Image: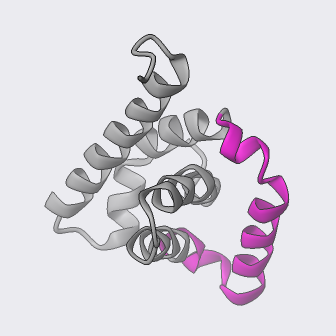
Amino acid sequence: MPDTNDPQQDESRLIDRMMTDLLSAMDQDDSDMRSTLIENGDDIRALAEICRQTGVFEHSHAKFAEFKQHLEDSTPPEERLVKSWAWLLDRIVHSPTTLHMRGAVRLCVPLVALYLPPE
């Protein structure tokens, strides 16, 4: 039986809720994608900070670096924010399991945050 006082479960629920809220906000905005991402930048940064503290992210530095390098090699700087978001959504949609989907969020949201303009 799961431990209802487990901090990792609380963190997981928080990340899932924040991502759901972010997707809802993005869906309701009629602006172009780049503008919408920038408008939601504070939420993306907050979610990215929590994701960076997860075990999945901590154990996947090499994968994160690989994603980042691939994106930077294949995408002009002005397109990286939107491309990283599209990549995140693609990884979520094509995840074979919920575990993979959650891992994609924890690994890719920090990448999206990296390409937001400075505050």
As drawn, which residue projects farthest toward the right?
A: 62
- The verdict on residue 72 being magenta is yes
Instruction: Name the foreground residue: 87 vs 54.
Output: 54
Q: Nearer the viewer, residue 109 or 4?
A: 4
Magenta span: chief secondary structure = helix
In this view, 75 is above or below 49: below
| Residue at 69% across, 78% down | 71
Q: Is residue 83 left or right of residue 89?
A: right
The residue lying furthest to the front in this view is: 1
How far across and how far down the image is residue 108, in percent?
Answer: 58, 59
Q: Position of residue 32 (x, y in %)?
A: 29, 73
Give the quarter of the image for residue 81. bottom right
Q: Is residue 64 left or right of residue 31?
A: right
Q: Which residue is rendered at x = 26% and y = 44% of the image? A: 21
Question: On the rendered image, what quadrant is the C terminus found in?
Answer: top right
User: Can residue 89 be found in the magenta stretch?
Assistant: no
* Residue at the image position 49 percent from the left and 39 percent from the top: 47
Residue at 36 percent of width and 48 percent of height: 40
Q: In the rendering, at what x and y percent does residue 51 appear?
A: 58, 40
Residue 70 x/y as whole percent? 75, 80
Examine the rendered structure and indicate whether residue 48 appears above or below residue 31: above
**Direction top: furthest residue:** 5
> How did the renderer colour the structure?
one colour
For the record, the magenta segment spans 54-82
Q: Is residue 47 above or below residue 74?
A: above
